Amino acid sequence: KEVDLEERTELLDEKGIIGCDCLRCRFERNPDKADRYTRGELDCLLGLARSQERYVDAYNIVQAVLRLEPNDGAALLLQSRIVGWQGDFEEREKHLEEAATKVEYVPINDALDEINAYYRHEKSDAHSIPSMEPWTTVEGIENDVFVGTDILDADECEKMVDLAERF
């Protein structure tokens, strides 16, 4: 279980330690004062939040980074990824589209191409991504199964699905 700032402060108080001045606690006490932190400090906080799967905190930290550097392509991409990790794929796509209008950052364009090729069933103009064709002949699967024609042929895919369903 993740322990929030208030619980961490109480635990320290119980041990006779008055307050914590670590980077994480300082940021969580005043997240809207991100200009007090260096980019390196924010990156450190961001890495910790991501590794602990604290995506709301990670999103808040990315917002702080973007207040300092609004056209940082890596931060804009990470913002969209965090939203996607939380399950809001439409918002993820919106963030990516907005980011693509702000900066020229190849990984943002790649992420948009992936959405178009794999999730929207469109062929990308920017890159050569394998065409995706729906294949619905697998018994017991209600939705389309997408087969990358440049990766597996339909018979191989059916064998793999059968194998996965057995185990």
Image: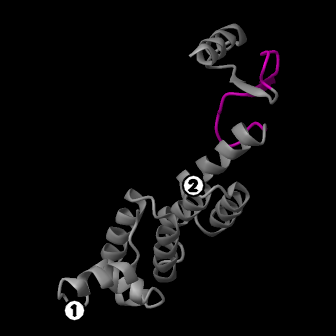
Residue 96 shown in magenta: no
Q: Quadrant of residue 97?
A: bottom right
Nearer to us of marks 2 and 1 is: 1
In the image, 66 versus 146, the foreground residue is 146
- Residue at the spot of label 1: 18
Q: Position of residue 57 (x, y in %)?
A: 47, 71
Say if 134 sits above or below 101 in the image: above
Q: Quadrant of the N terminus?
A: bottom left
Disc 2 to disc 1, how far (Cα)? 36 Å
Task: Please give the range of residues in magenta.
Answer: 122-141
* Magenta span main SS: loop
Query: Residue sitting at 58 percent across and 66 percent down?
Result: 103
Check residue 71 in the rendering and tell me which mark sits there, or answer none.
none
Question: SS class of the residue under badge 1?
Answer: loop
Q: Position of residue 44 (x, y in %)?
A: 32, 69
Judge the density around disc 1: few (<14), some (14-19), many (≥20) Cα neighbours within 10 Å.
Answer: few
Camera sees residue 25: yes
Residue 149 spot, x, y in % from top left = 69, 19
Which amino acid, mark 1? Ile
Q: Amino acid at mark 2?
A: Trp
As drawn, 154 above or below 96: above
Of residues 162 and 82, which is closer to you in this image?
Answer: 162
Q: Quadrant of the C terminus?
A: top right
Q: Position of residue 161 (x, y in %)?
A: 65, 17
Q: Which residue is pictured at 22% across the width and 92% down the height?
A: 18
Q: Quadrant of residue 113?
A: top right
- Any part of residue 37 in sight: no
Identify the residue position indicated by label 2 in the image.
85
In the figure, is residue 144 to the left or right of 6?
right
Residue at figure coordinates x 78%, y 42% from the top left: 120
